[in-house]
Image (tube, grey):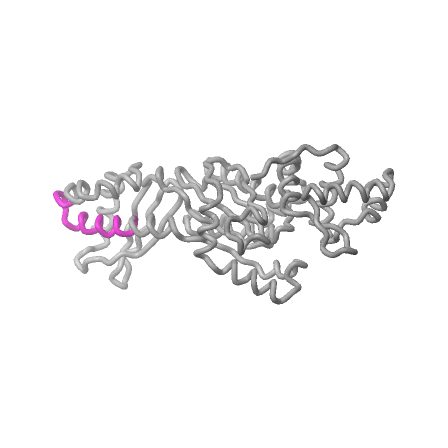
Amino acid sequence: MKKEFKISERKHDLLISAVENYIENVSPITSEKVHNTLFKNLSSATLRNELSALEEMGYLRQLHTSSGRVPTTKAYRYYVNHIINNRDIDADLVNEIKDKFVMRSTFLSDMLSDIAKSINQITNFPTYVRIKSYDDLTVQGINIIPLITGQGLLLFQTSAGLINNTIDLNPDVTEDICKDASKYLTTNLYNKKITDIIENIDYYNQLFKRQISFYQELFVAVTGILKQFTEQRASKLVHANSTRLLNEPEYKDINEAKKFLRLIENEKEIKEIIDNIDDNSSSDVVFTIGEENLNEKYSDYSIINTNYNIGNGVVASVSVLGPERMDYAKIASALKYISDELDKYNKE
């Protein structure tokens, strides 16, 4: 990132106002408009000079020779660096988040979906949730329920929530065997990390084989599900898109709308972009703005990313993708608030 030069207090106030005005109204800034609405104590000539200076410094650019100026990537970066962490969350926004943030289930897959949908509804922009770590995920309980189809429903209680799947059952495996096996597996695997179980599969296979062969058979099925879970979830994105973003002025042009829709449906590229964002274990909000994106196709867009602890040892990366002109303060506040709510949820 290029070094940021210190600017005068007047230029600072003018730049912040220009960015916020453009975010809210999508209206290029002009000296006349600034004079009439924001800085009535300054002459139009003074404002023209200040705006011209901000343009020379790379914070503003002109769309056309006769038009006003609009913020650049550098301006949005300045705004984010100086404003986001210095503002309290708006009370109206808190109420909006409370209305839309709902955790419907203790199933991990549903929790991820709820997070994505809630943030998507608040921001109107595509939201992506990706599991980053299972290192400390532990077993809290295993329940195998036989189904009339000849399969078994596996309910796997972890320190982060429930995982559910189906497994094939031997015709000789009765409901009582499933109950006994569930109790036995829970007793022997309780509080064990999933990574440790997978690494020591041979040991547990021999242990359960010495007891009842059915237990060993069910354990093989259980570990198969665990392997799938850790391998697939680590590379899977849970995302929520919204056609409401097409109401944004940037996408009134049908070609721009199509371009953005193609980008947000390219899951492979989205994963790569999220992976390229600075990895941090804290819940700090990270902004990748416009031209800061390593992928040039995303140079007109911004990504706001943070990490959530959705359960003991399970960290999810949450990313909001939208145009460079986004309400960064609102989105950052929403991400921080939900992070706090998840912390409370995890402690309950």
- Which residue does the image show at 49% across and 51% down from the upper left? 128
- The spot of residue 248 in percent (x, y) is 65, 58
* Residues in magenta, as a range: 209-226
Task: Give the quarter of the image for residue 11.
Answer: top right
- The spot of residue 22 in percent (x, y) is 72, 49
- Which residue does the image show at 65% across and 35% down from the upper left? 82
Q: How many numbered circles are shown?
A: 0
Q: Can residue 273 be seen?
A: yes
- Residue 224 falls inside the magenta stretch: yes
- Which residue does the image show at 62% across and 42% down from the upper left? 77
- Which residue does the image show at 65% across and 65% down from the upper left? 253
Q: Can residue 24 be seen?
A: no
Q: Residue furthest bottom?
A: 254
Q: Is residue 215 above or below residue 188?
A: below
Using the image as rendered, state which of residue 182 and residue 269 is in the foreground. 269
Q: Identify the main secondary structure in magenta.
A: helix
